[in-house]
Image (cartoon, helix red, strand yellow):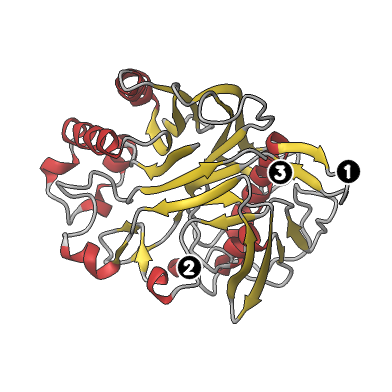
Amino acid sequence: MLFTVMSYNILAQDLLESNMFLYEHCSPECLTWEYRKNNLLKEIRKAAVDVICFQEVQVNHYHMFWKPQLMRNGYQGVFKKRTEGKTDGCAIFFKTKLFSIEKCIPVEFYKPRISKLLDKDNIGLIVVLRPVIGVSSDYSGSLVIANTHLLYNPVRGDIKLAQLCLFLSEIDKAAYRGLSKRSKRPMYNPIIFCGDLNLIPNSPLYTLIVKGELWFNGLLAGDMSGQEFGAGKGRRLGSINLPGPDESTPEKACHLLNLLSVYNYESPEEEKKVTTFNNNNTSQSVDFIFYSVEDKLSILHKGKVYHEHANEKSLKLIAHYNLLTHQQLKSTGGLPNFQNSSDHLPLLAKFLLRDL
C-alpha cells in the first residue's frame, strides 16, 4: 500500500500578528489570513497527500476552515490545542478512503508532577490508524502517526529533552505489539513521527531520536538542540529523571523505537537544506519526518549519526520532497511570501506499507 505524508507548520495567524517584527521583510498583503488561508489550502490540495500533520493550527481556524474544507476532499481530522490558554495546537488529517481511526491520543507536556521540566504549554497528538484498502485481509498491524511542536526557546534544551522523552514514551505505548517470541525484544507497529521539533540535524536531541540514546550529563542546555541562538548558553545538565524505558538513567535518555529521518542529513548536500527562514537572514532545518524500521545499525562519528544498515520491512521510504537551501530561499525574499504562506516549508514523503 502506497501512501503519502506531509508535515507542515502553517503559522498560526495569532502568532504572526503578535510577532510582526519577525515579518518586517514581508509584503503586508501576503500576511493577511484571507490571503494565507486560500494559498495554503491551494497548496495542500495540489499536494493531495494521504496524511497531513499540521503544527500551529489556530483553534477557530481548525473548526471553521480547515476541518470543513478538508472534509470536502475526503479527510477526517483530529486536533489538540496547546494548554495554558494558548490559541493554537496540532492537527492530523487522513484520507478516509485509505484509513480508519482506531485511537486518538492527545499528549500534554504540562506535567510538573512527573518532572519540574515539564511545565510548558506544548503538546503532541498521536493517532493509531488501520489501513482499509491495499493490504491483505489478514494484516494484523496498524499505523501510528505522531505529531508535535516542541518548545522553541534555544537555551532550554533541558525542557525539550523532557518533552521529547515524554512524547517518545507515549509513541512507544501506542505502537507496542508485544515481545518477540524468538528474540524477546519489543515489537512495534509502523511509526511515522512528524513535527516542528525546534532542533537541528546532528544535534544531541536529534541524536537521541535516531540513535536511541543520549548521555546528557555535563551538556549545556543551550547546546542540546543545536539552534544558533542557544550555543554555549544555559545551565549544565546534571542528573534528571526522565520518562522512558528501564534502560533510561538519571544521566542517559533512551528509547527503543528504531527511527530514521526521511531526509539524509549525513549527506553534505542535504545538510545545506533548510525548512524555515526569518527576517534575521537565518535559516535552519527544524521540521522533520521520522519513520520506523525493524532494526538498524547506527554509528556516531564526529558528531554525526551514520546508518550503515536499516531493515525497512513493513514500512519502506519510497521518495520525498526536495528542500531548498538558504540561498534559494533568500532569493525569494524569505518566508512568508506570495507563493509560500508560512514561515516554514512543508515536508512530504511517500511510503510503502507492507504486511508484516
Label 2 crowding class (10 Å Cα cut-off): few <14, some 14-19, many 20+?
A: some
Residue wearing tag 2: 265
Task: Inspect this view and state whether residue 134 appears.
Answer: yes
Could you say whether the residue bearing mark 3 is in a helix, strand or loop? helix
Task: Inspect this view and state whether residue 149 appears.
Answer: no
Q: Front-most of 339 and 258?
A: 258
The image shows residue 213 at horizontal and vertical percentages of 72, 62
The image shows residue 217 at horizontal and vertical percentages of 74, 69
Of labels 1 and 3, earlier in sequence is 3
Q: Residue at x 35, y 22 (%)?
A: 60
Marks 1/2: CA–CA distance? 35 Å
As drawn, 273 above or below 183: below
281 displayed left or right of 286? left
The quarter of the displayed image where residue 55 is located: top left
Label 3 crowding class (10 Å Cα cut-off): few <14, some 14-19, many 20+?
A: many
The image shows residue 240 at horizontal and vertical percentages of 76, 57
Residue wearing tag 3: 169
Q: Amino acid at mark 1?
A: Lys
As drawn, 329 above or below 186: below
Residue wearing tag 1: 181
Q: Residue at x 53, y 23 (%)?
A: 132
Q: Residue at x 73, y 53 (%)?
A: 255
**The disc label shown at residue 225, or none:** none
Could you say whether the residue bearing mark 1 is in a helix, strand or loop? loop
Of labels 2 and 3, earlier in sequence is 3
As drawn, 194 above or below 221: above
104 displayed left or right of 328? right
Q: Amino acid at mark 3?
A: Ser
Q: Quadrant of the C terminus?
A: top right
338 displayed left or right of 286? left
Which is more foreground, mark 1 or mark 2?
Answer: 1
Could you say whether the residue bearing mark 2 is in a helix, strand or loop? loop
